[in-house]
Image: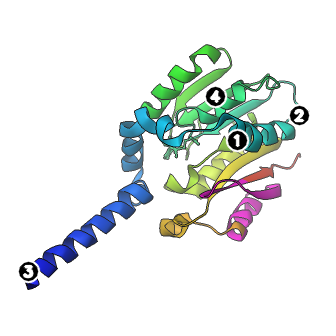
Amino acid sequence: MNLILFILAAILIIGGLYYWLVVVTEGVFLGRRVVVWLYDITAHKYDRIKEFDAEAEQFFVIRPLLRQLRHIPAPRILDVATGTGRLPWFLLHEPSFHGRVIGLDASAGMLREAAQKLRPFHHRASLVQQTADHLPFPAHTFDAVTCLEALEFFPSDIQALQEMVRVLRPGGILMVTRRCGREAKTFLHHHHSPTQFEAILTRLGLTNIQTRPWQLDYDLVIATRPAI
Ligand SMILES: C[S@@+](CC[C@H](N)C(=O)[O-])C[C@H]1O[C@@H](n2cnc3c(N)ncnc32)[C@H](O)[C@@H]1O
């Protein structure tokens, strides 16, 4: 009897740990290579799982971003952790967008999916395989930097945010997501309350910080790098 209870307890503990480490936090406590490997092996089904709704994407993400950039005829946008190219794809379908977009991601598998989708827009979209902690661009390059549903999976979200601010030109726009909802606190130090997150952005020199509820698991946060 004791042995059966012991085995049941062990199964529960191992199963719970697996669920937390792999399913909920997607490998972030096992290191960057594990996170990227998990995305590599699931890239082919990512879009099917996410079922993005074109109208919702345009309404909540693309148009608010373009409203902030309306005074720039052809904005240059960097999408960090672009995955299968969600943001570039919806951005390039918006007739009022005449700019260019670069999608950066660490996962070759996710970028392969993105490359297929973005092929019709190859003259205005490019993809780069790189991690978010060292962005391979000079300072002040982009009119906007975006990063959707990814900060909590980086080894250091603060280092990645520093890099995003570095490559943003003065007056440029940062659009990122903050993990919220039921599972957010299980990310431990990778989780920030709205106040903490806004304080991080303020320390990085950003202003006009607006946090907007977006999805069950994510707030959308928009901020400006002040003009010099
Ligand atoms: C949940 S997906 C989000 C993808 C896309 N932004 C979207 O909203 O559909 C997270 C992405 O972050 C990428 N990623 C994880 N860690 C990374 C890192 N350290 N540097 C760059 N990309 C990373 C993964 O490969 C994956 O494509």
Q: Residues within 10 Å of mark 4 (few under 14, many from 20)?
A: some
Location of mark 2 (residue):
70
> The disc labelled 2 sits on which kind of residue?
Arg
Q: Nearer the viewer, mark 4 or mark 3?
A: 3
In primary-sequence order, the first of circles 4 and 3 is 3
Rounded to the nearest angstrom, the CA distance separating label 1 from label 4 is 14 Å
Q: Residue furthest bottom?
A: 2
In primary-sequence order, the first of circles 2 and 1 is 1
Location of mark 4 (residue):
89
Q: Residue at x 60, y 23 (%)?
A: 126
Residue nearest the observer in this picture, 168 or 192: 192
In the picture, measured across the screen, residue 222 lies left or right of residue 20, that is: right
Q: Is residue 30 visible?
A: no
Rounded to the nearest angstrom, the CA distance separating label 4 from label 3 is 55 Å
In primary-sequence order, the first of circles 1 and 4 is 1
The local secondary structure at tag 1 comes to helix
